[in-house]
Image: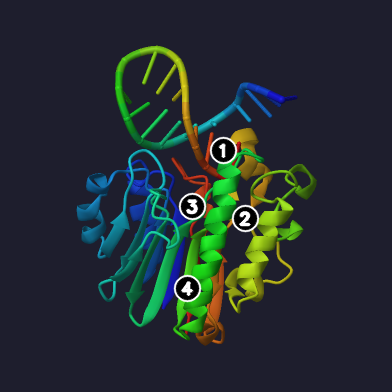
DNA sequence: ATGCCTAATGCAATTAGA
């Protein structure tokens, strides 16, 4: 079973790139982030024509998450992270797909720090940690997949000293990531590639991709029942180098 | 410290991204 995550940065503007990559990679399940489209503007027909069932939570202009599946129909279990009924951002969607619970998430960026956006990021992270504990306690096979907007360690950023005060690399954000991980989650990419430089995002600015000035911020976290089934974990970085690319590359894992 | 680039909105210039 191959599960992928891809922050598309605009699902409609990115549709040709997305369809080409789906055809090439043929993942079984895909979590998408930053749809940047209202609910009614999701390209449902094109996704179906490509062979995928889809559920999505859209939002005008920003955010937006989706789960695609070419096997079983995703059975939605949750839309929106519990813990704050006033949070209207479309950042979390969860579904059972072929016996695995898939949580697709888009954690807030949080810049500038300090400020209300950073406070929102930390609060959102606390809600994710609380929900993560429930998911671990369920003993179900669960995958948290998506854009976490966190570089966990210095190995995950091209120039750590430049990012230390940034909301993606601040000590309290990295600490939150490891509190989540310490519940028993497995960081799939880092586990299979402990010493590699792995990036999933390259800024549009400053020719970042050509300079390989990247960040590892898109992650797969596996619950204990899945940890032993992890076979592969890769970044399709060539997609980032293509025409009209998102600033993120697709990332995927393979489970036995 | 800011701009560098890109997308969405909506038709100019702003907001947001990371």
**Cβ atoms under marks 3 and 4 closer than 8 Å:** no
Where B9 sits versus A93, above or below? above
Q: Can you say which quadrant of the picture contains the N terminus of chain A?
A: bottom left
Crowdedness near tag 2: few (<14), some (14–19) or many (≥20) residues, C-alpha within 10 Å: many
Residue at 60% x, 45% y is A118
- Measured in 3D between alpha carbons, the distance from the residue under mark 3 to the one under mark 1, in whole angstroms, is 14 Å
Please give the residue where the numbered disc 1 appears in the rendered image. Answer: A204
Query: For the residues carrying marks 3 and 4, which lies nearer the camera in this image?
Result: 4
* Image coordinates for residue A247, horizontal then vertical, percent: 52, 45
Query: Mark 2 vs mark 3: which is more N-terminal?
Result: 2
| Along the line of sight, the residue nearer the viewer: A215 or A149 | A149
Whether marks 3 and 4 lie on the same chain: yes
**Cβ atoms under marks 2 and 1 closer than 8 Å:** no
Query: For the residues carrying marks 3 and 1, which lies nearer the camera in this image?
Result: 1
Query: Mark 3 vs mark 1: which is more N-terminal?
Result: 1
* Image coordinates for residue A41, horizontal then vertical, percent: 25, 44
Q: Mark 2 falls within which chain?
A: A
* Image coordinates for residue A105, horizontal then vertical, percent: 46, 59
Q: Secondary structure at mark 2?
A: loop
Query: For the residues carrying marks 2 and 3, which lies nearer the camera in this image?
Result: 2
Whether marks 4 and 1 lie on the same chain: yes
Please give the residue where the numbered disc 4 appears in the rendered image. Answer: A143
Please give the residue where the numbered disc 2 appears in the rendered image. Answer: A150
In terms of image quadrants, where is residue A103?
bottom left
Query: Mark 3 vs mark 4: which is more N-terminal?
Result: 4
Residue at 45% x, 82% y is A141
Is residue A239 something one can see in this rendering?
yes
Crowdedness near tag 1: few (<14), some (14–19) or many (≥20) residues, C-alpha within 10 Å: few
**Cβ atoms under marks 2 and 3 closer than 8 Å:** no
In terms of image quadrants, where is residue A81?
bottom left
């Amino acid at each position: 079973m191959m599960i992928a995550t891809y922050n598309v940065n605009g699902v409609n503007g990115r549709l040709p790139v997305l369809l080409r990559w789906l055809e090439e990679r043929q993942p079984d399940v895909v979590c998408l982030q930053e749809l940047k489209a209202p609910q009614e503007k999701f390209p449902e027909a094109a996704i179906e024509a490509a062979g995928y069932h889809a559920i999505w939570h859209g939002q005008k202009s920003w955010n937006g998450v989706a789960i695609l599946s070419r096997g079983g129909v995703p059975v939605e279990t949750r839309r929106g992270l519990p813990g704050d009924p006033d949070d209207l951002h479309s950042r979390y969607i969860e579904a059972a797909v072929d016996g695995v619970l898939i949580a697709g998430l888009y954690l807030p960026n949080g810049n500038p720090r300090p400020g209300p956006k950073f406070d929102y990021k930390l609060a959102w992270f606390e809600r994710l940690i609380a929900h993560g504990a429930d998911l671990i306690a369920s003993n179900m096979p669960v995958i948290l997949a998506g854009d976490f907007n966190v570089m966990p360690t210095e190995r995950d950023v091209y120039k750590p000293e430049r990012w230390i005060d940034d909301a993606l690399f601040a000590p309290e954000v990295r600490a939150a990531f490891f509190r989540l991980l310490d519940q028993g989650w497995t960081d799939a990419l880092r586990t299979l590639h402990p010493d590699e430089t792995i990036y999933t995002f390259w800024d549009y600015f400053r020719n970042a991709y050509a300079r390989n000035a990247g960040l590892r911020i898109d992650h797969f976290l596996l619950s204990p029942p899945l940890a032993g089934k992890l076979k592969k974990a890769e970044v399709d970085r060539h997609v980032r180098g293509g025409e009209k690319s998102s600033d993120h590359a697709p990332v995927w894992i393979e489970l036995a």
